[in-house]
Image: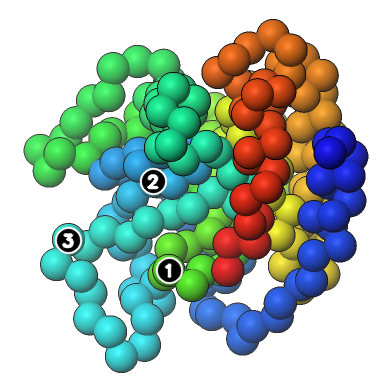
Amino acid sequence: YSVEMYIANSIISSIAKSEPEPFEGKIYQLHRLKEVIDGDTIKIEILDDDWIKEGEERPDSNLISIRLMGVNCFDKWDQTSWLEAKRCTLEFFTYGKEPSLDEDGYIILEKLEYRMKVIKRDSTDRLLAYIVAHPKYSYQEDDFFNDGEDLSLMLIRDGLAIPSINFCIKDNDLEYFQRMFEYVEYAITAYNDFSYKDFDSIWCNEKLSDEIDIIIDPY
């Protein structure tokens, strides 16, 4: 089962349309986060009342889960790769340093400017979002990804995630198709670099077939 066949089958997946919510497409700057759950999921405080479903109350914890767009990392069943992806995501937010905590126990994001673009809510009430880090004062409002470090792309490049095509596609929006192709391009490069060399990589031959066999569609 080749990488090219996996990509082709993923692209053929159907695109489900749904009524947009007010926050879809909005960009939020992140100043702190509560927890890195794993390589592709974090928890942050609720920054927008629109994130709370109509008819529901704000949770006592005031927290919500954010799921990265465009990628799947290994889950806990592969403990080594799961821990490595989690470590890599934490270091993305701490600039490779020990986390600094505020008085509420949140990790302070202080070295770079972190922003997320929320795309939609999934069936488990997580928000699906791209997350990008920029050097301070360099962000350009008209280009979310420009000159920034895309966390999803970084995980693919480092051999810790595979593209999940259904995450990238939303209602035939050209912007996300373009992002999809960039993820796939980096994934093929990572596959060639890591598949025979690094047992912790998601592209290691012993692991690749297991990961591809899972259901890719997250909704």
Say what amino acid the circle numbered 2 marks.
Ile
| Label ID, residue 157 | none
Q: Which residue is identified by label 3?
A: 61
Quarter occupied by the C terminus: bottom right
Camera sees residue 149: no
Q: Going by the picture, which residue comes out furthest to the top? A: 197
Q: Earlier in the sequence, mark 2 or mark 3?
A: 2
Q: Which residue lies furthest to the left in this view?
A: 103
For label 3, the crowd category at 10 Å Cα-Cα, with few meaning under 14, some 14 to 19 and many 20 or more, is few
Residue at left offset 40%, top offset 37%: 76
Q: Nearer the viewer, residue 178 or 206?
A: 206
Left or right: residue 66 versus residue 185 is: left
Residue receiving disc 1 = 124
Q: How crowded is mark 1: few (under 14 residues within 10 Å), some or many (20 or more)?
A: few
Q: In which quarter of the image is residue 216?
A: bottom right
Dot 3 amino acid type: Ser
| Residue designated by label 2 | 42
Residues at circles 1 and 3 in contact by the CB criterion of under 8 Å:
no
Element class at badge 2: strand
209, above or below 53, in the image: above
